[in-house]
Amino acid sequence: MSSSNNVLISGKHITKVFGYGNHKTTAVNDVSFDLHEGEIVSIVGESGSGKTTLAKMIMGLLKETSGTIEYKGKPRQLRNHAARKKYWKDIQAIFQDPFSSFNLFYKVEKLLMDCIKLQGLKLPREEQVQKMKDACSFVNLKYEELFNKYPFELSGGQMQRLMIARIFMLHPKVLIADEPTSMVDACSRSTILDMLMKLRQENNMTIIFITHDVGLSYYVSDTIYIMEKGKIVESGIAEEVILNPQHKYTKQLIEDVPKIHSEWNLA
Amino acid sequence: MSENILEVKGLKTYYKTRLRENVYAVDGVDFALEEGKTLGIAGESGCGKSTLALSLMGFYFPPLHYNSGSISINGTDIMKLTKEQLRTQVSGREIAYIPQAAMNALNPTMKIIRFIEDIMKEHRPELTKQQVWQMASERFETLNLSPKVLNSYPNELSGGMKQRTVIAISTILNPKVLIADEPTSALDVTSQKAVIKLLKNLLEKKFIKSLVFITHELPLLYHVTDEIVVMYAGEFVERGTAEQMIFDPVHPYTKKLMGSILVPEEGMKGQKLAAIPGAPPNLKKVPAGCRFADRCSFARDECREGKVEIKVVDGRLYRCLFDTETLKEWYENEQQQ
């Protein structure tokens, strides 16, 4: 479980509605949650259940239609650019598609340099390079080979690890990982998960996994929220939710996953 | 023993890069597939799985080129046919291929029925539009897909539905072999299950006779396939029944691959996941000896010399210098540490 019980982010009755009039779609419907410091949380659901919309609202990329999100006990302020920048120092994200999360016109060096600039640090050149080297070696990449390359010259796994190197440099309080491993193969998946776990141990970071991979969420998280059609239908400690599901939808979801020690019911 | 429906011998295909280098992505692959059987191909990204699938079709578009080897379907070598013969007689009728992200291949301005009409114009020109409609809706109904789909545009369908539609369209001529390249990798678990059900259904109703299933999701392969082949750096490294491969792998690479399985089962939490250091070798310059040696924790000096041939022990094929007993002992020692 979480190492401390300080609530870092809490959402109260959050609702998001897209569209107007007859074309209204409620993507997230009256969702409340408490995320603690150092906790790993998974939000699990099938496509279209509103999990990414929820993540975007936590990140401050979308505005909630009603309800409030509190950060460190106070309603968060995102009115102007300076306030948003301050918020994003603490909250960072890794997205599903590594190929579209980088600016194609920037070399890897500039990308990592921006992380140093975002922190507002003024360092001599040698220290900057040292910092970038440290970040790259943390994720088993070689800075010397990479710094002069463009993102599209890297493989998917390398890009995703570079994304984690960025997180390592910024050490945010909260990391939102939106399907971080759905586009990489099983081996890179375990490497990436290992790195995220290591990162958490170092900075006591809160990680929010958004995923449809039930196996992954069970493996990594302390707490699991199951979402169906914009609502959280079940939540609790990972072991309890996965091994002893109560809600019909959760049962269905777990049954749909192919397992290796039990039959897969295809009927 | 029933007849081999697909037989591949010494298939070698390569990519020619702009710098005139040849990258052998499929380097000497041999296998045979019996009628009614399903073969799974597993491996990391960049191991040549998708290139193998593409090569099996017999069509080679640059930068992919053919070097040597034969592909026989029901005894006829398709490599000896002309391109025109391949297009009219083989593709779609004998062998069908579902590429990765196939659901994005549907032209958004065409209704689903138009795709089927297109196929029929080429292969069964005697049918009228009504007959095609009749036939397509019957087929969709037997596969538990709503015939309403035929009259809709691709953007009206969900991802899982699009994928199932693509599979139904590509098997409409009852091909003998279906090659499915990662048909479920972009889908969530519920749609994934629906796709698998459809594939099983096709096999049961004998619309297709055999299936080659490519994925890196090992738990899925365990439930779908009879046999699993693990591919590494353009070669097969191990072949066995699904049961053997998942619970009793021989080759160190397979062992590591099986260790990275994540399933929501008791005891999974807290277990350490196996991660393989490094990346597959660059196939522009293939290392001598065992191709996995650089990443293998048991590699000895002799692993880096000569060429490691495939061995057959108790009906299982694997490509490693050491015998099964030695390997097992090493695995046990590693676990104790």
Image (cartoon, coloured by chain):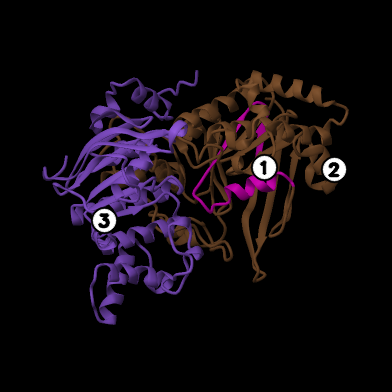
Chain colours: A purple, B brown
Residue drawn 45% across the image and 20% down it: A265
Does B112 sit left or right of B76 as displayed? left
- Tell me if mark 1 has few (under 14), some (14-19) or many (20+) residues whose alpha carbon lies within 10 angstroms of its own: few
Residue drawn 39% across the image and 72% down it: A109
Q: Is residue A98 magenta?
A: no
Residue that label 1 marks: B107
Tell me residue B279's x, y (percent): 45, 58
Give the mark nearest the N terminus, 2 or 1: 2
Residue A106 falls in which quadrant of the image?
bottom left
Residue kind at label 3, given as amino acid type: Arg
Q: Secondary structure at mark 3?
A: loop
Residue A4 falls in which quadrant of the image?
top left
Q: CA distance from mark 2 to mark 1?
A: 26 Å
Tell me residue B52's x, y (percent): 63, 47
Q: Secondary structure at mark 1?
A: loop
Chain at numbered mark 2 = B
**Quadrant of the image for the N terminus of chain A?**
top left
Q: Nearer the viewer, mark 2 or mark 1?
A: 1
Residue that label 3 marks: A79
Q: Is residue B314 visible in the rendered structure shown here?
A: no
Question: What range of the chain is rendered magenta?
Answer: B30-58
Q: CA distance from mark 3 to mark 2?
A: 66 Å
Q: Which mark is residue B85?
A: 2
Are the two marked residues, 1 and 3, in contact with CB atoms closer than 8 angstroms?
Answer: no
Chain at numbered mark 1 = B
Q: Nearer the viewer, mark 1 or mark 3?
A: 3
- Tell me if mark 2 has few (under 14), some (14-19) or many (20+) residues whose alpha carbon lies within 10 angstroms of its own: few
- Tell me if mark 3 has few (under 14), some (14-19) or many (20+) residues whose alpha carbon lies within 10 angstroms of its own: few
Tell me residue A138's x, y (percent): 30, 62
Q: Is residue A102 visible in the rendered structure shown here?
A: yes
Chain at numbered mark 3 = A
Do the dots labelled 2 and 1 sit on one chain?
yes
